[in-house]
Image (cartoon, rainbow, N blue to C red):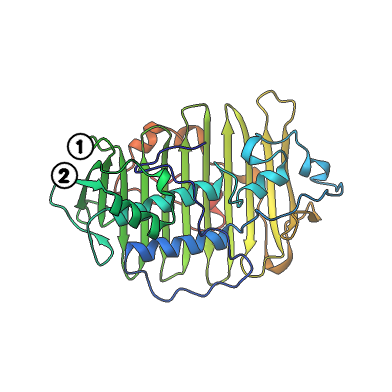
C-alpha cells in the first residue's frame, strides 16, 4: 500500500530493527536538533520492535493454548500481515512487509528527515519564516534529501516542485505541547493539509506528524529524557475500509518494552500485544486474537512465550517468560478503533495533542493521543 505522505511516499526502511541483540545504552543527554531527535527515535524504535525479517518459517508443534492456531492461516487478514498469528506478529518488524508497524513508522521518520533537510534551518532546527513561504525542491535539494535521509530519488517529486509551507512558534499557545509547527501544501499554495510539530528541550523530545490527504494518518513520538522512557503512537485510515493503530513504550532503565498492533480490514480485526526485554530477548511474550466478521474463524485471545530465534512456542499458555518478561492479555485491550481511526479525528489534532498512556498497563486502555 504505497502512498504519498506530505513530500513523498517513502519506501526505504533504513535503520529500524537492526539492533535487537545488544543492550541499549542509557541516554544521558537530550538531542539538540531535529536530526538528533530523528536518530534517537529510529534507535528506540529498532530496540522496541526487533527486526524479524530473517526469522525462519519452520513448522511448529501443537500446544495447548495457541496450538495449531499459532500457524493456522484462518486467523489473519492476509497480504503483508502474514497468513497466521505467528506471521502477523513476525511481520510487524519485517523490513520487507509494507503497511505494518515498522514500515509505517519508518515512513514517518523519513518524512520528518525530509522536512528538516528541505526547510531553511539554523543549527538543525527549522527557522521561523515569518509567514507563508515556498520551498523549491531543486535537483540539489533532492540530492541532499537522498544523501541525508536514505530515500530514493525516484520516490521524490519532480525537480523544481514548489511546496507551500510555514513555520510558526506555538510555544505560547494555551496548553501547547510543542514549540514549533510546520504546515505543508504540495500544490505550492496555502491549503495546508499536513503538519509537523516538535519540541526539543533538556527534559523531553516530542514530535508529531499529521497528514489528511489521501490516506489520513497521525503519528506521535516522545522521549522523556529524565525518566528515560520512549513512547510512540501511530494511526492510519485508508480510502478503502482499512485502518491500523500501533502504540509502544520502552524503558531504558529496565530494557523492558511493549507494543500493541491492531489492524482492521472492513470489520475483521487482528490484534496483538507483544512484550520484550531488549538486549536480553531470547523470548518475547505474545497475546493474539482475531475477530472474524463472519464469526466462522474467530480466535479468542491466546497467550504464549515465543522464541525470538524462530518464533516457535517456547511456553504455551504462559505469561511469565524468560529474562523478566511478564506478558499481557490482548483481551484487556480496549482501544476505541471506531472513534480514533478517522480522518475527522485526525483533522482535530492540534498543538495540545499528546500521548495519553504512560506505562505497560494503560498502553492497552488509554485514549489515543488527543
* Rendered residue at 37%/47% (across/down): 209
Residue 364 x %, y %? 56, 48
Q: Residues within 10 Å of mark 2 (few under 14, many from 20)?
A: some
- Residue corresponding to mark 2: 132
Cα gap from disc 1 to disc 2, whole angstroms:
7 Å
Q: Secondary structure at mark 1?
A: loop
Where does residue 127 sit, x and y in percent of width and height? 20, 58
For the question of whether residue 315 can be seen, the reply is: yes
Q: Measuring from the top left, give residue 277's x and y in whole percent.
A: 63, 65
Looking at the rendered image, the quarter that the C terminus falls into is top left
Residue 235, percent from left and from top: 47, 42
Residue displayed at 32% across by 66% down: 33
Q: Residue placed at 31% from the left, 59% from the top?
A: 199
Instruction: Please report contact status of discs 1 and 2: CB closer than 8 Å, yes or no.
Output: yes
Q: Earlier in the sequence, mark 1 or mark 2?
A: 2
Q: How many marks?
A: 2
Q: Is residue 177 visible?
A: no
Q: Residues within 10 Å of mark 1 (few under 14, many from 20)?
A: some
74 vs 136, left or right, is right
Residue at x 79%, y 54% (from the top left corner): 313
Q: Which one is nearer the viewer's eye here, 194 or 292?
A: 194
Label disc, if present, on residue 20 of the rendered structure = none
Q: Quadrant of residue 161?
A: top left
Q: Splitting the image into 4 quarters, where does residue 116 fall?
A: bottom left
The single residue placed furthest to the top in the displayed view is 294
For the residue labelled by badge 2, is the local secondary structure a helix, a strand or a loop? Answer: loop
Residue receiving disc 1: 190
Task: State the residue lying farthest toward the left.
Answer: 130
Amino acid at each position: 500500500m504505497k502512498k504519498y505522505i506530505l513530500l513523498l511516499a517513502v519506501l526505504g526502511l533504513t535503520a529500524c530493527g537492526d539492533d535487537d541483540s545488544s543492550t541499549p545504552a542509557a541516554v544521558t543527554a537530550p538531542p539538540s536538533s531535529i536530526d538528533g531527535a530523528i536518530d534517537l527515535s529510529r534507535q528506540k524504535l529498532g530496540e522496541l520492535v526487533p527486526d524479524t525479517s530473517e526469522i525462519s518459517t519452520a513448522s511448529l508443534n501443537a500446544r495447548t493454548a495457541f496450538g495449531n492456531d499459532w500457524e493456522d492461516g484462518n486467523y489473519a487478514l492476509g497480504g503483508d500481515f502474514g497468513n497466521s498469528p505467528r506471521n502477523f506478529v513476525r511481520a510487524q518488524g519485517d523490513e520487507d512487509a509494507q503497511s505494518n508497524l515498522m514500515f509505517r513508522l519508518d515512513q514517518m521518520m523519513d518524512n520528518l528527515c525530509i522536512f528538516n533537510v528541505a526547510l531553511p534551518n539554523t543549527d538543525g532546527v527549522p527557522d521561523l519564516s515569518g509567514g507563508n513561504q515556498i520551498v523549491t525542491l531543486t535537483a540539489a535539494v533532492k540530492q541532499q534529501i537522498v544523501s541525508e535521509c536514505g530515500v530514493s530519488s525516484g520516490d521524490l517529486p519532480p525537480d523544481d516542485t514548489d511546496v507551500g509551507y510555514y513555520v510558526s512558534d506555538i510555544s505560547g499557545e494555551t496548553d501547547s505541547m510543542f514549540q514549533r509547527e510546520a504546515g505543508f501544501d504540495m500544490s505550492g499554495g496555502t491549503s495546508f493539509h499536513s503538519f509537523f510539530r516538535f519540541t526539543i528541550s533538556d527534559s523531553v523530545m516530542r514530535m508529531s506528524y499529521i497528514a489528511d490527504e489521501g490516506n489520513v494518518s497521525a503519528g506521535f513520538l516522545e522521549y522523556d529524557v529524565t525518566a528515560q522512557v520512549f513512547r510512540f503512537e501511530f494511526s492510519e485510515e485508508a480510502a478503502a475500509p482499512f485502518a491500523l493503530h500501533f502504540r509502544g513504550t520502552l524503558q531504558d532503565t529496565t530494557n523492558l518494552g511493549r507494543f500493541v498492533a491492531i489492524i482492521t480490514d472492513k470489520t475483521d480485526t487482528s490484534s496483538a500485544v507483544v512484550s520484550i526485554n531488549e538486549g536480553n530477548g531470547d523470548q518475547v511474550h505474545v497475546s493474539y486474537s482475531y475477530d472474524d466478521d463472519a464469526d466462522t474463524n474467530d480466535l479468542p485471545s491466546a497467550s504464549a512465550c515465543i522464541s525470538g530465534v524462530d518464533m516457535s512456542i517456547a511456553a504455551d499458555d504462559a505469561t511469565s517468560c524468560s529474562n523478566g518478561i511478564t506478558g499481557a492479555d490482548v483481551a484487556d485491550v480496549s482501544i476505541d478503533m471506531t472513534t480514533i481511526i478517522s480522518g475527522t479525528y485526525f483533522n482535530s489534532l492540534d498543538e495540545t495533542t499528546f500521548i495519553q498512556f504512560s506505562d505497560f498497563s494503560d498502553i492497552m486502555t488509554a485514549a489515543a493521543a488527543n
